[in-house]
Amino acid sequence: MSGNYPNTFYRVAVKALIKNNEGQILLVKENSDKWDLPGGGLDHDEEPEDGIKRELLEEIGVSSGITVGKIVKQKSFWIDDKKAWLMWIVYEVKLANQTHFSPGEGVTDIKFINPQSFHASNDERERYLTVFM
C-alpha cells in the first residue's frame, strides 16, 4: 500500500474566474501558447485567497480591488510532461478595475475571451474553459 501512496498526491492550483459584462473570461498565456485562467500553485501553508491574490499580482499586475468569492469548480488534470496530477480549484473573483493589466514574468498575453471559442481546442485544459460559459 505504501508504494501507491505517492500517486495520490496532487499539485493544487487556485484559479481566478474573472468575467466581464459580456460574459467573457480573463485568460493568460504564461510560458506556453495555451490560454489558462490566471492563478497557479498554492504554496505550503498558504490560504487559497492569499494564493489567488499573490498569483494575480505575479501574472497580471493587480494588487488591489480584488474580491475572492466562492469556489465555482474543481477539476483534476493529468500533466503528462510532469507525470503528475494537477487539481484546479476555481474561485469566482471580482476586480474593481478590469481594464489595466501588466503582464508578469513569463506572461505573453492577457485577454478577455469568450470561453465558447475553446470548444474544439486540442488541449484538455483549454476545452475545460467552456464550462464557464
Image: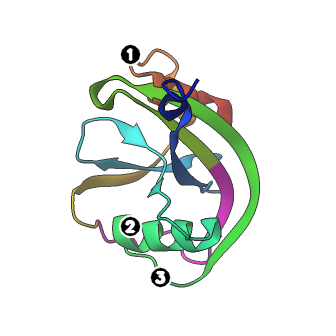
The image position of residue 66, as x and y in percent, is 61, 76
Q: Which residue is mark 3?
A: 63
Q: Position of 66 compared to 7: left or right?
A: right
> Magenta segment: does it hold 21?
no
Residue sitting nearer the eye, 46 or 69: 46
- How crowded pointer 1 is (Cα within 10 Å; few <14, some 14-19, many 20+) is rated as few
Rendering coords of residue 119 (x, y %): 52, 19
User: Circle 2 sits on which residue?
Assistant: 60
Which quarter of the figure is the C terminus placed in?
A: top right
Q: Amino acid at mark 2?
A: Ile
Please provide percent x and percent y for residue 56: 46, 68
Q: Is residue 106 above or below residue 66?
A: above
Magenta extent? 90-103
First of labels 3, 1 by sequence position: 3
Q: Which residue does the image show at 38% across and 16% down from the upper left?
A: 122
Element under label 2?
A: helix
Badges 2 and 3: C-beta atoms under 8 Å apart?
Answer: no
Seen in the picture, residue 14 relative to 98 is either above or below; the reply is: above
The residue drawn where x is 45% and y is 76% is: 62
Amino acid type at circle 1 is: Asn
Q: Please give the name of the residue rendered at 74% of the width and 47% of the height, measured from the top-left corner.
A: 72
SS at badge 1? loop
Give the numbered dot on residue 122.
Answer: 1
- Residue farthest along the front direction in this orientation: 2
State the CA–CA distance, disc 2 to disc 1. 25 Å
Q: CA distance from mark 2 to mark 3?
A: 9 Å
Label 2 with label 1: CB-CB less than 8 Å: no
Q: Residues within 10 Å of mark 2 (few under 14, many from 20)?
A: many
